[in-house]
Image: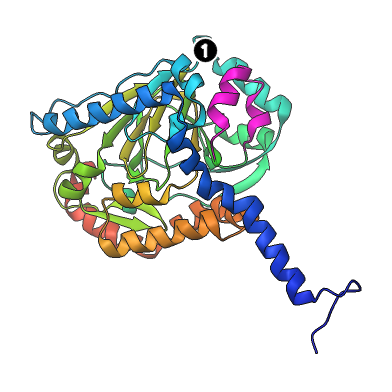
Amino acid sequence: MSSSSPNGISIKTALWGAVAGYFVTCKLPKAIGPIGLYFSEPGACSVMRETLLATHKIAKVQYKGDPTEPLEFPSIPFSLIEECGPESFNMPFPYTFKWTEDNIDAKDLVPMFLAKNKTVSYRPAADFGLNKNTPFNFLVTKLGSMKKGSFDEAWQCISKGKCSLYFDNTWVKDDYESIMPDNVVKTLIRGSDFGSMFMSNYKEYQLTAPAHAAPFKSLATQITQAKKWVFFDPFISKDYLPVDQNALVTVVQSMAQDHEETLKKIPRYEVVTGPGDGLYFPEYWIHIVYTEPGVNTMTNWRMPAQIWSGFKTSPHTPLNKAYLTFNFFAKEYIFPDWLIRWRINSGQDAQQADVHKMFTYRKNLFDENAGAKYN
């Protein structure tokens, strides 16, 4: 005999009803949303899309030219992005934009953060004297574990250059309303899934992130100082780079050849983002990041996973494509949001734990070959 509630509905039926209600209210809109946009896309979106697709087609011809000359991304007026809305960050090709002309200085930004004194995630800053980053040694770099604490506590360490906010996923819309104009916050955050804050205070210009890529469309907004980015089209990565995946992060296996000389021979894009600059790029665009010294602050917003777009774009093997597609189908349409949030917040430590397993072997081999010039 099955148990039933006082009104005669069985507990099993009630549970199935609750599950069905969850999918209809939380997951179904994600599935049908893109279909609706396809039939009713604003004119500003259509113009952006057609221009970016045309640019990408010509770029594939430019890739056959001199690879020592890096290419540039097109620039989109922010007014066009505002008119298009969240679909601006579901485009097929990267672009840059200016989100404000009223730049914030670090001496004004830090007091704002201290006044909020929110709980943040931070970690020991990378020791570049001990482990020198190169363009392709992502799997030969180790970072310390995340810590949680007040921004005041974190800043005491960041201000000395000993810690950094690195993939700090604790920041939400309210945290940005004090440092960005209202229209900018509304435009940039409305379509995002989550955002990661990066804040460092290095004494010298550093290569802070070797080649890697996320499986999400991303939107970087530079707040203070500047970063230089080097990008590879997935079309190029598939043919030129030894691409692999590590804890859902797309990485490049460290080759024996000189990394910097190898970089010069691969078709690529270069862009510098200064205060008030924005940079959008689709999933699987492998990138390398260089960070200017001083209090350098940037937020990287991640968009919801687009499964079909990601599958088409991915430079991975069929097996890795299938693995990643299954994971992101489950993320978007099956797993509850609280579980996804927990996984995102612990993702960087999980990725680092995976790196640590083979670190000694990889480091020894790297030091014997491409890394010898840094010893």
State the image coordinates of residue 248 (x, y, percent, origin top left): 41, 56
Looking at the rendering, in which quadrant would you find the C terminus? top left
Locate residue 354, reporting x and y percent: 42, 61
Mark 1 packing: few (<14 Cα in 10 Å), some, or many (20+)?
some
Question: Could you say which quadrant of the image residue 355 lies in?
Answer: bottom left
The single residue placed furthest to the left in the displayed view is 65
Query: Amino acid type of disc 1?
Result: Asn
Where does the image place residue 214, in percent across and percent down from the top left?
A: 40, 46
Can residue 278 be seen by looking at this rendering?
no
Q: Residue at x 38, y 18 (%)?
A: 76
Q: Decide: is 6 above or below 368.
A: below
Whether residue 74 can be seen here:
yes
Question: Vertical placement of 359 versus 40: above or below?
Answer: below
Residue on which the image places disc 1: 103
User: With respect to residue 359, does 2 lie above or below?
Assistant: below
In front: 158, or 237? 237
Q: Is residue 172 magenta?
A: yes
Q: Which residue lies furthest to the top in this view?
A: 102
Would you identify the image quadrant in which residue 136 lies?
Answer: top left
Q: In this view, does 109 lie to the left or right of 268?
A: right
* Left or right: 201 as drawn, with respect to 8: left
Image location of residue 7, percent across then percent down: 89, 71
On the picture, is 352 further left or further right than 116? left
The N terminus - image quarter: bottom right
> Residue at the location (23% across, 31% down)?
56
* Magenta run includes residue 24: no
In the picture provided, is 72 more to the left or to the right than 168? left
| Residue span colored magenta | 171-192
